[in-house]
Image (tube, helix red, strand yellow):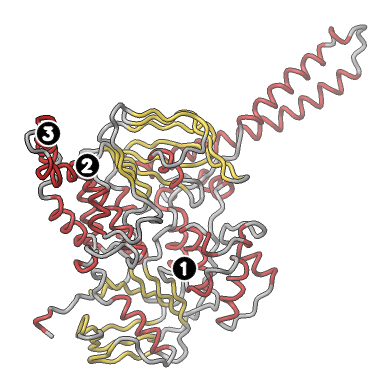
Amino acid sequence: MLINLQNISKTIGAKPLYSDLSLTVQPGEKVGLIGRNGLGKTTLLGIMAGTDHDFGGQVEHRRGLVTASTAQEHHGSLDTPVLEYVLASLPEYSRLKHIIDTFPDTMGDDMQKITTYSDALTRFGELGYYDITERARAELEAFQVPPAAIDGPLRPLSGGQKRFVELVKVTLADADLALIDEPTNHMDYVAKAAFIDWLGKATQAVVVVTHDRDVLAKVDRIIELKGHGLVSFPGNYTAYLKQNGDSTAKEISDYENGQKRLVKLEKQIRDARARKAGWSGTADKTNPFMLLERRLTKERDELLATMHRPDFWIDQQTITTMQDKVVTKYEKYKSRNIRLRTGAEHRARELVTVDGLSLGYGQPLFAHTSFSLAVGERLRLHGRNGAGKSTLVRAILASAASQPLESRQFAGTIVIDPKTTIGVYEQEIDAKYLSLPLGAAIMRTYQDKGVEINDQRVRQILADYLFDPQLDGRLDIARLSGGQKARFQLISMLCDNPNLLILDEPTNHLDLPSIEELEKALGHYAGAVLYISHDSYFAENVGGDTVEIAPMLKSAV
C-alpha cells in the first residue's frame, strides 16, 4: 500500500463532494480517475498530494512515500525560469546540488563536510541527476515547450505550455506516486504518444484524472467518482465499459425493485393503521396491528435511507448489445446530460474550397494544401501543434467575414460560400466574456451574433447544459471549471443555427457522457463539420476525410 484514504468527507460551501469515500493505491498501479464535471476529481488529487487539509477522515501513507503532482496554479513561481522550476521540484535535487556546488570551496580538511560532500555525489548519481539538465531540456521540447522558452520565466507561457511543464516535472521526479491532472489537454498526437509511452513504462504508481479514452485504454484500473463516493472497475477503458454496463443494468433493476417495495410498504402501512384503529382488544400493547405498523414503518425508513437514485450512464456502444427491456429502463432513469439542439439545411452544396494554399508569417507554415467541404461532410485537420492548423482555421473565418487575414497568404485560394454561417468551438474563451456572469455571457453571445434572446430562454439554455439557472447563472465565466467553460463554448457555437461547425479540440475538459453526447449530436447534425482533434475515439466516431497539415522544411522555403 502506498496511500490509503479512509472515510473521507469534503464539502465546498454548501455543496457536499464526498461522503465516507475510501481509496487505496498500490505500488506501480496505474489508476484512471473519472467522473462528471464538478464532482471533485481535482480536489481529490489535492487531498492525496497533501495540499488540501480541509476534509474529514484519514489519509495514511507508506513510510517515506515520495509524491509528485501537477500544480494548477503558479502564484509565486511565474518569474522563475522554466528549467529551474522543473529541477527544483525534483526530490533532493536542490539540497544535493547546493552541497556539490558550494562545499568544495569551504570544506577544506573538515572530515564531516568531506563525508557529506562524498555522500551527496553518490546520491546525486543514484538519482540519475548528472545528466538531468539535458534530459529535462529534451523532455520539455518533446512536450512542446519551445527551446527559447526553457531558460525564460513561466509567466509568458500559455496555459497549455504550463501544463506541459508540470507534466515534465512529474515524469522526471521518479516518485513513488505521481498525481496527474488532465495531462493530454492541448497536446498534439506526438506529445500525447510520448506521454502514453511514459505511462506504460513508468515503474511508479500513477493516478491520472482524465477523460482521454486513449489514456484510459492504458491504465490498470478505473475509478469513477459518483454519488459522493468511488466505484472501482478493474482493467482498462474497454473493461470499464463492459463492467459499467452490467453494473448499471443491475442498479436500475435494484432501484426499480426498491421503488416497487416502497409502494407495497406504504400500502401495507396504511392497511395496518386502518386495522389498528378498529382493533377491539383492551390494551394497545397487545394490538397486533400496532406492532405490524411499527415493523413496516421501520423497514420503509431503512429502505428510504439506503435507496438513492444512482447516477446512470452507459456508453452507446454497450447499449447496442443490451436487451430492449434494459435499454427502455435505462432511457427512463439515465443521468441528465447536456441537450444539444442542432439543425441546419439539408441542401448539398460546397461551403468551403481551399486550393493550393500556403499560409505563414515570416515564412510559410505549410504549402500546397487543397480540400473542399460540402453540407453534410466532415473533415479533420491533422498535424503537430505549430504546423498551422489554427492558422488555417483563422484564415477561413477571416475569409468568411470578408476580413484581412492575420497571416500571409503565399499562394492558393480560400473560397467561402456567401450563405455559410459558421459556429466555432475554440480552446480559449473570448476575454470580453470572462468578467461576465454566465447568464449575462450567454445573453451577450446571442446578441453579438444578432440572435433574439430573453431571460426565459437563457434559463432554458442553462438547464439544457446542466447548469443551475439560479446559482450557476450568477457565476463569473472566469470562475467556472474547465468543463463548465467547455459547455459555454458549445452554447456560443450553436446559438445562431450555423451550417458549418469548426471545432478546435472540443473534447478537452468534457467528461465522458458529454463527449459522447457531442459525438451523438454531430452524428445527427445536417451541416458540415471541420474539426481538429487528437482524440482517436472522437475522430473515429465523427469520421470524415483527414487533411494532413505538415510544417514546411526550412530548406524548402
Q: Secondary structure at mark 3?
A: helix
Q: Tell me the residue that label 2 is attached to.
A: 95
515, above or below 91, in the image: below
| Most foreground residue, 506 or 287 | 506
**What is the secondary structure assignment of the residue under circle 2?**
helix
Q: Nearer the viewer, residue 376 or 102?
A: 102
Residue at image point 12% right, 80% down:
554
Could you tell me if the residues under marks 2 and 3 are in contact, i.e. CB atoms within 8 Å? no
Task: Give the residue drawn at x 27%, y 64%.
Answer: 188
Identify the image quadrant of residue 92. top left
Q: Which amino acid, mark 3?
A: Asp
Q: Amino acid at mark 1?
A: His
Residue 410 vs 80, above or below: the answer is below
Residue at image coords 52%, 75%: 432
Quarter in which the N terminus is drawn: top left
Mark found first going from the N terminus, 2 or 3: 2
* Residue 217 position in % (x across, y down): 29, 48
Look at the picture and state if 472 lies above or below 253: below
Q: Residue 221 appears in which quarter of the rendering?
A: top left
Q: Quadrant of residue 113?
A: top left
| Residue 47, image x, y percentages | 43, 39
Q: Is residue 30 visible?
A: no
Q: Circle 3 is placed at which residue position?
A: 119
Between disc 3 and disc 1, whose residue precedes?
3
